[in-house]
Image (cartoon, rainbow, N blue to C red):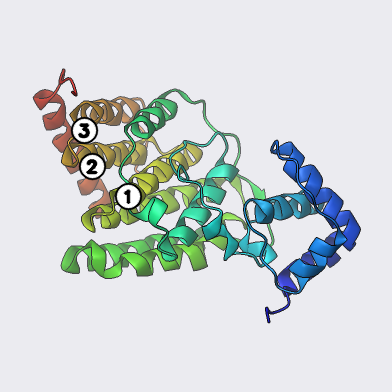
Amino acid sequence: MADRNARLAALMDEGGFSHKSLARAVVVAAARSGQDITCDHTYVSRWLKGAIPRGDMPRFIADAIGRKLGRQLAIDDIGMGDAAVSAIQPNLGLDFADHPETATTTVADLWRADLADADPLVRALPDSAAWNEASVRWLVSPPDGELTRSGNRSVGAVDVEMIRSTADAFSILDGRFGGGHARRALIQYLHTDVRPMLDGKYSDVVGRELHSAVAEALLLAGWMSYDSGLHGIAQRYFIQALRMTQAAGDRLLGGSILSAMSHQATFVGRYREAATLARAAFTGPAAASRQRWPHSSARWKRERWHAWEMNAGVISRCPRRNDS
């Protein structure tokens, strides 16, 4: 027998939901996504007893409750994290999201799916169109607004430094033993410790540093996945890392991520895309050349400069290559 869903019950109490009112709110949430569903109070009773609905229903439940509470909820928050894997869409993580909040939800779903070893994502092949769209969106999208958040957990500069220090430790393990050695442990850390910070309470300044630190950690996750031969999930981590730099306003780190994407495209034989990504890696940071390095680590500076030098070679070798 399934365990009672205490998280869902607590959120219903907080929002003043009855079984019937929640059912109605879920139907409305589904309609906002263009879906016509059936849901009544008996469904809610089963959820509270621990049943996990199929398809997109958990997402609609989180949306319905989150709108009432005035904050964004993930599937984990409503006690239905196991449902996320069964509801995975093959294109998860390939989009450069319009809003930072959407990117936060996307990376949380990616981390969960990766830990569950979801084949449609983890062992997928790279998508050339996704590379092109992400680089163009990063180059032309206007800056995001303020990143001030009002969640329940306070996040400060010490928390951001903890993320960076932890990522540095994983990077050392990666360098000594290879990406496959600690890849899963890094993803588990991001899922368990970092995701709640993204939904926390912080100022705009801290928010930008937080998103930059998460972007660096996602870049490392991408490299580790690449080294393990998992190019589909690696591409998704690179794209979401790039989106995080957009939120952070960190063009230099964005250039480094585009360089990594170019490296991957070259490795899998997508030379036209590799050259396009390499040019984008130069173009974006050029506009921010007078910015200060957001992270003082000499390691990151050396890696970024090395990546840009590498991409200069990519551009010179394949400026007009036509793919057959």
The x, y position of residue 219, in whole percent, is 34, 50
For mark 3, what is the residue? 270
* Disc 2, SS: helix
Residue, far top: 320
Outermost bottom residue:
1
Which residue occupies 51% across, 25% down?
142
The residue shown at (52%, 48%) is 106
Q: Answer few, some or many: residues within 10 Å of disc 3's Cα (few below 14, many 20 plus, some between 14 and 19).
A: some
Residue 12 horizontal/vertical position (percent): 82, 64
1 or 2: tag closer to the N-terminus: 1
Residue 240, position as x, y percentages in the image: 43, 44
Looking at the image, tell me whether mark 3 or mark 1 is earlier in sequence order: 1
| Relative horizontal placement of residue 136, taking residue 201 as reference (left or right) | left
Q: Is residue 79 above or below residue 258?
A: below
Three-letter residue code for mark 1: Ala
Q: Assess whether mark 2 and mark 1 are in contact (beta carbons under 8 angstroms).
A: yes
Task: State the residue position of label 2.
Answer: 264
Asked if the residue at tag 2 contacts the one at tag 3, i.e. Cβ–Cβ closer than 8 Å, the answer is no
Q: Residue 81: which quarter of the image?
A: bottom right
Q: Is residue 212 above or below residue 286?
A: below
Give SS at disc 3: loop
- Closest to the observer, 19 or 73: 19
Q: Is residue 141 left or right of residue 78?
A: left
Q: Is residue 150 visible?
A: no
Mark toward the viewer: 3 or 2: 3
